[in-house]
Image (cartoon, rainbow, N blue to C red):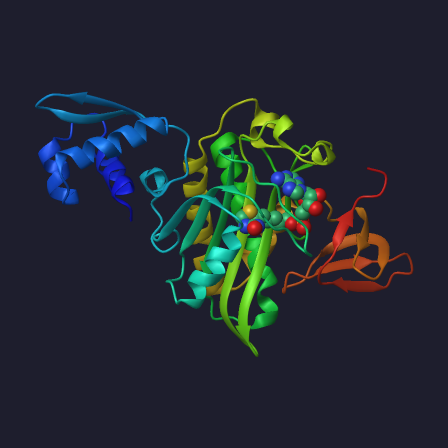
Amino acid sequence: KSMRQHLLQLLMEQRGSFVSGQEISDELGCSRTAIWKHISELRKEGYVIDAVQRKGYQLMYAPNRVTEPEIKRHLQSTVLAKHIRYEESVKSTQEIAQRLSYEHCPEGTLVIADEQTGGRGRLGRSWQSPKGSGIWMSLILRPDIPLQKSPQLTLLAAVSVAKAIYKTTGMQAEIKWPNDILLNGKKAVGILTELQAESDRIHAVIIGIGINVNVAETEFDPSLRDIATSLKIEGNEDVNRAKLVACIMEEMETLYHEYLQNGFGLIKLLWEGYAESIGKRIRVRTLHEQKEGIAKGITEEGVLLLEDDLGEIHHIYSADIEIPGT
Ligand code: BTX
């Protein structure tokens, strides 16, 4: 943890009162001059910190950021996000999480960045991740489950995000199988699940979650403006990113325990409650083919069931779906 993050944590823990320079230098093991330097850096980042002689420092205002102390301030979960790796700007948080996982980091480690320059979606697609306005994060899980059950975790993540969006903003999101979350029909969240496995054993599941939180319309690439949206565009209000991250982690923690103990049953039910396309006519596109029919639901494994016009049921493992005529 950097000196600056540590200092920030101290100031946050004692919000509403002054922290003396002596206390800070004891805690951090650094000089008064060094503290002063870090305080000025924090101010440049938008923190408002009051400094009064013989009293010390007091945090008056914290900007909307997703640093470790900001997230921890809202967090009650025990395993998930206990370890947080925050970065200002990275190519992709998935990449860092993959590496940390190979280095045997603990389960629940969360990698989060303020900006991604090469955010990735599925099938080699890219994910736009502008600076300062979204949640771009990757969570490392190490569940003891067979490989073919891993798609269930994408659905678990989607339900957790939809619940957390409702809790923090009151907005009702819809889930589009397998991994998109929509607000008023437009994509506000994307989820990408990547695996580290050897033969049939899962070493880690890395769940990448991208949320357009306070992204303005002009921040989206023109090609996305018709299909993408953000929580702020739909709700007309700034959303505290750190609070939303914490809320997602808490929802996920609850569902993950439920999942490990009792299996996919409850999550499947919750998921179906949020799913926009179940019972509707959809078009399914895979790399090689395209099918149309009625979405009947998902299986115990999280596989989509499609009934074609001849009444035949198809299992769809991975695809993009569309609702014809929209
Ligand atoms: P996807 O393949 O389902 O969606 C990618 C498609 O979505 C793109 O081709 C584009 O059309 C559209 N798109 C791109 N950026 C955005 C955006 N910001 N909002 C809405 N639509 C967009 C979805 O893949 C999975 C995305 C996961 C992103 C997270 S962010 C943290 C982690 N790190 C990383 O590199 N990826 C994940």
Q: Residue at x 41, y 38 (%)?
A: 66
Residue 133 position, x and y percent, is: 51, 33
Report whether 309 appears left or right of 305: right
Residue 69 falls left or right of residue 235: left
Judged from this view, the residue extending furthest toward the right is: 310
Q: Specify whether 122 is left or right of 311.
A: left
- Residue 174 is situated, as x and y percent measured from the top left of the image, at 64, 41
The residue lying at 77 percent from left, 53 percent from top is 295
Which of the 4 image quarters holds residue 49?
A: top left
Q: What percent of the width, then of the height, locates residue 22?
A: 9, 35
Can residue 279 be spotted in the picture? no
298 or 125: which is nearer to us?
A: 125
**In this rendering, is residue 59 above or below 77?**
above
Q: Please tell me in which quadrant of the rendered image residue 302 appears.
A: bottom right
Q: Residue at x 37, y 50 (%)?
A: 84
Residue 35 horizontal/vertical position (percent):
19, 35
In terms of depth relative to the viewer, which is nearer, 106 or 163? Answer: 106
Residue occupying image coordinates x 23% and y 32%: 37
Is residue 155 something one can see in this rendering? yes
Name the side, left or right, on which 40 lies relative to 305: left
